[in-house]
Amino acid sequence: MFKRIASLALLFAASVITAAGAAELRPAVTVTGDTVTLGDLFDNAGDAAVTVANAPAPGARGEISVSRISLAARRNGVEWRNDAGLTHVVVARNGTQVPDMDVAAAIASAIEAQSSALPSSSQLQVDFENGMAGIQVADGAEPTVKVEQLAFNQRSGAFTAILRAPANDMLSPLRRMTGRAYPVTDVPVLVRDMQPGEIVHQQDIDWVRLPSNRVSQNIVTSLEHLVGMSPRRPARAGEPMRIAEMQPPILVEKGAQVDVTLISGSLTLTARGRALENGAVGDVVNVVNTRSNRTIQGVVEGPNMVRIDAPGAARAANFAAQARNS
């Protein structure tokens, strides 16, 4: 009886030692190379550099069936027990991200090369079907991409691109990318609400990108139509401005006292008057001498400054003389 108990104890101890030393299959692994080995898949697998399967593409995930793993383990002397009842192992591969903007630029260049009808003043906006490109290359590889094939529907903007990453590695896997590309135009907008009379400065401007088919010819697209100008009516931040909605700032207001300068050859005369209307730089306004009630036209050249040139010199001189005598 004692011998039987001792034998059972030894058998139990041996089974415990075997279980403790058995390899343990991982339910999920992450690799960096092109292959998945027994050493990647098992803990306590010893020197198991045996390849079981090819790794997924960099940044991608895949699965390996446990039956395939079990066959490779048995052939190479790896002892293990599937106590967890696994049916597959998830394999992920590390990689280096190719910037989405670089992928978009490569696709845009390819589309522009085959589509000559695109607006010359626009650039292409590339939107990926899944929101991002998500292309990665192997760790240590150059994060570049090349368009190998392209199908583009100019009417709908839909594209399908076959990409190679890295660009110059002919053995790198090809990736299929879908999305939509369409012309866009950068438009200046105000960063704050502004009222008539306020002058737009460089720091008051931001840029937004709009589909080109939404940017009509009367929309402000350059700074020259915005900087130094003033809105004719209240303007809201972030909204495209129409050219007609902007004007040079009012430098002479109706009813304001103004300095009037007559220039005729080498003759320069000055007088005071009252503006009968608003005027911006370059506008022609009527100015009246309040004493004589005589009116003459002049050109606004600065804040409350009006210039009168020949051939109206005679009337201007008379106006100036009346102003001095009054």
Image: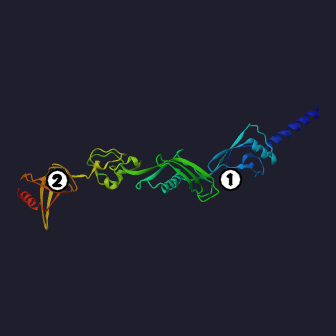
Say which element carries label 1.
loop
> Callout 1: 10 Å neighbours few (<14), some, many (20+)?
some
Query: Who is closer to the viewer here, 179 or 142?
Result: 179
Residue at the top extreme of this rendering: 1
Asked if 144 appears above or below 5 in the picture, the reply is: below
94 left or right of 270 in image:
right
217 left or right of 138 in image:
left
Asked if 52 appears above or below 12 in the picture, the reply is: below
Percent coordinates x, y for residue 177 in the rendering: 56, 48
Quarter-wise, where is residue 305 in the image? bottom left
Determine the CA span between mark 1 and mark 2: 80 Å
Q: Of the residues under marks 1 and 2, which one precedes in the sequence? A: 1
What residue type is disc 1 on? Asp
Percent coordinates x, y for residue 165 in the rendering: 59, 55
Note whether residue 27 is visible.
Answer: no
Note whether residue 185 is visible.
Answer: yes
Residue, x 40% and y 49% (percent of image)?
212
What residue type is disc 2 on? Val
Residue, x 70% and y 42% (percent of image)?
89
Q: Quadrant of the C terminus?
A: bottom left
107 left or right of 55 in image:
left
Residue under circle 2? Answer: 285
How has the structure been colored for display? rainbow
What numbered label is drawn on residue 206? none
Residue, x 76% and y 41% (percent of image)?
67
Say which element carries label 2.
strand
Residue under circle 1? Answer: 34
62 left or right of 207 in image:
right
Percent coordinates x, y for residue 228 in the rendering: 29, 54
> Callout 2: 10 Å neighbours few (<14), some, many (20+)?
many
Residue, x 52% and y 53% (percent of image)?
107
